[in-house]
Image (tube, coloured by chain):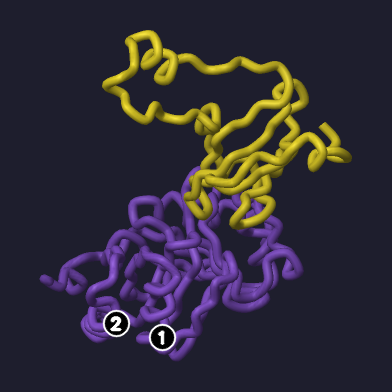
Chain colours: A purple, B yellow
């Protein structure tokens, strides 16, 4: 497949003290039954967790639970071919769907003591660490855009945003940050 | 905000969901054998219940799955949600659930 990452510019991200864009990454959307998930995650060196809304992460690679038969696989940008070949070898002959969505979305990191309250300006989920612990991930809404929200640390969230929504989402967060940071 | 209990993800805010019409409508086994009347009933005729109503809902901005729900159309209370393919809870199982 032709690699467009070198010629593609990242979307506009509004500057904000609590939000920073993350570097481009390899993103694959995998759908299949639990056997498919177990062998795919095993091939990537990730733990297979069937619990809803939980992410598995190891040595820069992650698998985010999006649905009972759906995982978003994240890896560093340079590992695209390696990850793709590992998955193709592990999933040969099994019914599954593997889609490259690397350029469909971009990642933002929201971090700091006010990260939770900032996201709650547009996201109705309970982001208390008891209700949304570290390692929990889910698709949800932020203001009027759909996002994937993943808590990577107590005060740090990873957001996967569709690239055409990224200017809107970052502007919403920048505006909300003005309310929270004097 | 109204919370809806997704059978996969747990309690989530209402705005992550979309309504998917009446639940438990079986497609006729052999459409060619149906009269026009029966086929039209299957396609278009839906109940308009005041009270307990079986509905399909989809957790669009979440796990993306369809599921079924029993909702009271007068009070907007969800009495139960259950996965597609499962039987709706009986009256006895619903005892004690506040409508």
Closer-to-camera residue (B53/B3)? B53
Q: How far apart are marks 1 and 2 (CA)?
A: 9 Å
Look at 72% across and 36% down and name the residue there: B78
Quarter-wise, where is residue A40 in the image?
A: bottom left
Residue A133 image offset from top left, x and y in percent: 68, 72
Q: What element carries label 1?
A: helix
Q: How far across and down, in percent of the image, does residue A170 sit?
A: 47, 57
Q: Is A99 rendered above or below residue A164?
A: below
Circle 2 sits on which residue?
A90
Say the numbered circle drawn on residue B48.
none
Q: In which quarter of the image is residue B77?
A: top right
Quarter of the N terminus of chain A within the rendering: bottom left
Taking A34 as reference, is B19 above or below it? Answer: above
Residue count near mark 2 (Cα–Cα under 10 Å), binned few <14, some 14–19, many ≥20:
some
Question: Does residue A11 lie above or below B40 as drawn?
Answer: below
Q: In this view, does A100 lie to the left or right of B10?
A: left
Q: Where is residue A28 in the image (x, y as percent from the top left)?
A: 32, 69
Residue located farthest toward the front when viewing the structure as drawn: B33
Quadrant of image for the C terminus of chain A: bottom right
Q: Do the residues labelled 1 and 2 touch (CB within 8 Å)?
A: yes
Task: Give the residue furthest to the top.
Answer: B37
Residue at which label 1 appears: A42
- Dot 1 or dot 2: first in sequence order is 1
- Asked if badges 1 and 2 are on one and the same chain, I answer yes
Q: Which residue is drawn at 49% across and 60% down?
A: A67
Query: For the residue carrying disc 1, how many other residues have a C-alpha within 10 Å: few (<14), some (14-19), or many (20+)?
Result: some
Secondary structure of the residue carrying numbered label 2: helix
User: Looking at the rendering, which quadrant does residue B84 occupy?
Assistant: top right
Q: Is residue B10 visible?
A: yes
């Amino acid at each position: 497949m032709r690699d467009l990452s070198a010629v593609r510019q990242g979307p506009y991200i509004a500057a904000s003290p609590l939000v920073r864009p993350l570097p481009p990454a390899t993103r694959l959307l995998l759908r299949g039954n639990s056997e498919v998930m177990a062998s795919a995650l095993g091939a990537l060196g990730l733990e297979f967790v069937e619990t809803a809304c939980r992410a598995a992460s190891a040595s820069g690679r992650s698998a985010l639970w999006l649905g009972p038969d759906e995982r978003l696989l994240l890896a560093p940008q340079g590992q695209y071919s390696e990850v793709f070949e590992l998955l193709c070898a592990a999933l040969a002959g099994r019914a599954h769907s593997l889609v490259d969505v690397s350029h469909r979305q971009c990642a933002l990191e929201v971090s700091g003591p006010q990260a939770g309250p900032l996201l709650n300006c547009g996201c109705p989920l309970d982001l208390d660490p008891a209700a949304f612990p570290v390692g929990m991930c889910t698709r949800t809404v932020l203001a009027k855009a759909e996002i994937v929200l993943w808590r990577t640390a107590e005060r740090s969230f990873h957001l996967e945003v569709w690239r055409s929504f990224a200017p809107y989402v970052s502007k919403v967060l920048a505006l909300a940050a003005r309310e929270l940071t004097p | 905000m109204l919370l809806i209990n997704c059978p996969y993800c747990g309690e989530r805010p209402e705005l992550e969901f979309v309504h998917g019409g009446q639940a438990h409508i079986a497609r006729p086994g052999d459409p060619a054998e149906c009269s026009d009347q029966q086929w039209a009933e299957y396609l278009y005729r839906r109940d308009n219940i005041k009270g307990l109503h079986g509905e399909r809902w989809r957790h669009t901005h979440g796990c993306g799955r369809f599921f079924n729900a029993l909702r009271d159309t007068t009070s907007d209370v969800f009495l139960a949600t259950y996965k597609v393919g499962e039987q709706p809870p009986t009256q006895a199982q619903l005892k004690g659930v506040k409508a």
